[in-house]
Image (cartoon, rainbow, N blue to C red):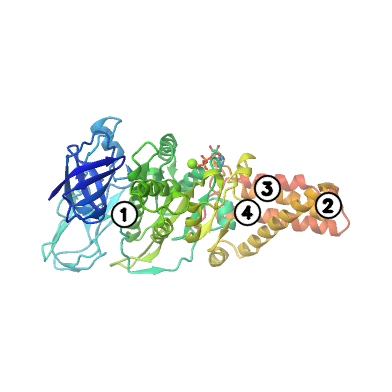
Amino acid sequence: MSGRVSRVVGALAQATGMRDAVLNEIVRVGESNLLAEVLRVDGEEATLQVFEETSGLALDEPVRREGRWLEVELGPGLLGSVLDGLGRPLDALAARSGDFVEAGMDVPTINPDARFVFRPSHSRGDRVEQGDVVGTVQERGLEHRIMVPPGRSGVIASIQSGEIGPHACLATLADGTVLSLVQRWPVRRPRPAASRLPSERPLLTGQRVFDLLYPVAEGGTVAVPGGFGTGKTVIEQSLAKYVDADLVVYVGCGERGNEMAEVLGDLARIADPRHGGSLLDRMVLVVNTSNMPVAARESSVYLGLTIAEYFRDMGYRVAVMADSLSRWAEALREIGSRLQEMPGEEGYPTYLASRAAKLHERAGRVRCLGMPERSGSVSLVSAVSPPGGDFSEPVTQACLRVAGALWALDPELAHRRQFPAVDTGASYSLYADTLERWFTLHVDARWGHTRSRVLELLQREGELREIATIVGPEALEDGDRLLLSVAAMLREFVLGQSAYQPGDADSPPEKTLALARAAVDAYTRSKESLASGKTFADLDLEAVRRTLVALRDAPATRGSGG
Ligand SMILES: Nc1ncnc2c1ncn2[C@@H]1O[C@H](COP(=O)(O)OP(=O)(O)O)[C@@H](O)[C@H]1O
Ligand SMILES: [Mg+2]
């Protein structure tokens, strides 16, 4: 059945003759085959969200239903790819149409001409259930596990071995079901897992301030709000490079295109410490920059999460970097206002909070479906860009309510070039207590104690600063002056970390602890000196500074990390 375009407003089109249309189904609009999604059905009328440029679309052009949801192809060949918000590889798009992406172009996510060597782990006659790994493909240093798609099961009637294309028949089940290396999945629906698991270990970020003070659990979620220029993108990029995950999915959502180009160049250049190769080899990038259509910006986050869940289902630990969820929410707002929905706070749709919650729920640690038994995780680190840096605005609040940790960025610190510009007064992690046990067991028994001492110092520093502004710093006692001096060094050398200093951009937990301990111990020793009659002027704080700098600049190798 097909309908006709009756109205076009920006990214929205109205169509008539759409009686049986289903919410969220995919349709093709117009002579140029624009991809669109059904947003609303009202009798014969349907409202369509068009994912591509609608200029040139005319009244009465046909609308064809595709009988499917917005889906993505999942399979070998994903690693290292750069996709647009609809899952089309940018290089393939460019090859077909030059730098301008033609509308309606259907480019498969996975290159149909690629060939992979499949090693089956099952044979004819075996019974398989959903999620079972039927064999593997070696892909860029990663074992790509080929799984029976969710909802499928049966006895294997035939199974291939050796070189095969991504879409070819890989195996058949007795009921006639055909399996290939590639499976499809609707991006808005979370992929199923056997059960949820508690998160007991950290997602090590390589950033001292986060690992030590505000750690995130594997399978956890973090919101990183900060005004313009506070360092959100640099944090997302540093994590993409150094986070201790098997794979990274980087969603560049609505941010500037040239920044994305930089990230890409960077990632391609950096060697992966674990697999050799380049870091890009263990990443998938979803790019929907500010110059691309707004509707696809909204879907790009779901696309990224779906890809992450797919690798999670193989038993991998996946980290998703989203930059930024504010652009995702703005896309929602734009679509909602075009639909003339009743707006909520600041024009955002009233369902913003529930959408944000659902999105965050797709993170987590799970026991995967099928055999062999395995667990996997999706962790989500989302930048949020509140206008004017005001955290009380709806998007920041919606994310805060559901994220397990908050890394609040402070423009004041960024202005003083104290990076990462983390506001230690406002940031927190709900995972800290659980993870302290892990760090204590796997890194050092003194982890928890050191962390508490650092937090105490920072807290006391805050109080003293207030007093100092009233009475003047000279009026402070020697012990308080000592505390302020050590806290300043703590901020500069322990919590501060340059993303651009090759030896220090990634800090293993052992190094993080050594630095924190050096600062905390120096404080204790100096305090004892004061107690034994020395004055502030007698203390050799320059030596402390030298020790910290030396520790920071010493080459570090990442430990096993448990
Ligand atoms: N960890 C860091 N180390 C060194 N410089 C940083 C760091 N974080 C941010 N910066 C500096 O701040 C600038 C702005 O950071 P960016 O991540 O682009 O901000 P945002 O995404 O919040 O607008 C960067 O170009 C860089 O110069
Ligand atoms: Mg940015």
Q: Secondary structure at mark 1?
A: strand
What crowding class fits label 3: few (fewer than 14 Cα within 10 Å), some (14-19), or many (20 or more)? many
Marks 4 and 3: in contact by CB < 8 Å?
Answer: no
Left or right side of 79 for 440: right
- Frontmost of labels 1 and 2 is 2
Mark number displayed over residue 548:
3
Q: Secondary structure at mark 2?
A: loop
Residue 559 visible in the current orientation: yes
Which comes sooner in the sequence, label 4 or label 2?
4
Which comes sooner in the sequence, label 1 or label 3?
1
Rendered residue at 27%/30% (across/down): 98
Give the labeled residue for mark 4.
424
Q: Is residue 432 above or below residue 488?
A: below
Q: Quadrant of residue 366?
A: bottom left
- Frontmost of labels 1 and 4 is 4
- Tell whether circle 1 marks a residue whose Cβ is less than 8 angstroms from ligand 1: no
Give the labeled residue for mark 2.
476
Q: Quadrant of residue 256?
A: top left
Amino acid, disc 2: Leu
- Frontmost of labels 2 and 3 is 2
Q: CA distance from mark 1 to mark 2?
A: 61 Å
Rendered residue at 64%/55% (across/down): 425
What crowding class fits label 4: few (fewer than 14 Cα within 10 Å), some (14-19), or many (20 or more)? many
